[in-house]
Amino acid sequence: MKVLIALDGSDCSRLVQEYLTAHPELFAVHHDYMVLHVVPDVPPHAAAVVGKETVANYYRDEAEQVLNPARQFFEESGYKVKTQYRHGHSAEIIAETATRDGYDLIVMGSHGHTALGNLVMGSVTAKVLAHCKTPVLIVR
């Protein structure tokens, strides 16, 4: 089974990791796991001022703050995961990645870092559910 694990570094992301490793009957260590983190885009006017290399380094550094601890957690739990980061709108990137790469399941948290934004715009999770045909397991 190919499983896409969407993490944003929030407390709910930690619950996702703990849930996966606590249920080996569902998530066996031999499955194909990809941990995906989406970094929000740098505004174009700011990117133009600081330059492409600085923006690329920012995206990488921000992603590694989430991906390094996740990698370590899964390795310590006996799971081999691949990691990937992209930048853009989280829901769009998650749905696009799951569809394009043929994932069987997306696992993500019910809430992320943007709780206040969720009240106004709707959550990333809801948008993934609305725009993706891949099954989604939501961890609370």
Image (tube, rainbow, N blue to C red):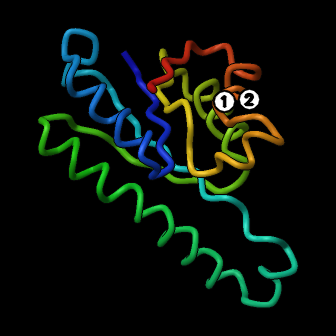
Q: Identify the residue at the far right of this view.
A: 45
Locate residue 45 relative to residue 115 in the image: left or right.
right
Residue at 73% across / 48% down in the picture? 89
Residue 55 place in picture, x, y as percent: 65, 78
Gap in angstroms between the C-alphas marked 1 and 2: 9 Å
Residue 111, by quadrant, is top right
Q: Which quadrant: the C terminus?
A: top left
Residue 56, by quadrant, is bottom right
Amino acid under disc 2: Lys
Crowding at mark 2 (Cα within 10 Å: few <14, some 14-19, many 20+) = some
Q: Which residue is mark 2?
A: 127
**Disc number placed over residue 53 in the picture, else none:** none
Question: Compared to 24, does 10 lie above or below?
Answer: below
Number of the front mark, 1 or 2: 2
The numbered mark, 1 or 2, whose residue comes first in the sequence reads 1
Residue 37 place in picture, x, y as percent: 51, 49
Locate residue 63 relative to residue 31 in the image: left or right.
right
Amino acid under disc 1: Ala
Contact between marks 1 and 2 (CB within 8 A): the answer is yes
Q: Observer-nearest residue: 83 or 7?
A: 7
Residue 133 place in picture, x, y as percent: 67, 13
Element marked by disc 1:
helix
Locate residue 77 relative to residue 55 in the image: left or right.
left
Residue at 55% across / 28% down in the picture? 101
Element marked by disc 2:
helix
Residue 84 place in picture, x, y as percent: 46, 49
Q: Identify the residue at the far bottom of this view.
A: 49
Residue 16, by quadrant, is top left
**Disc number placed over residue 95 in the picture, else none:** 1
Question: Compared to 135, does 14 lie above or below?
Answer: below
Residue at 33% across / 26% down in the picture? 32
Q: Which quadrant: the N terminus?
A: top left
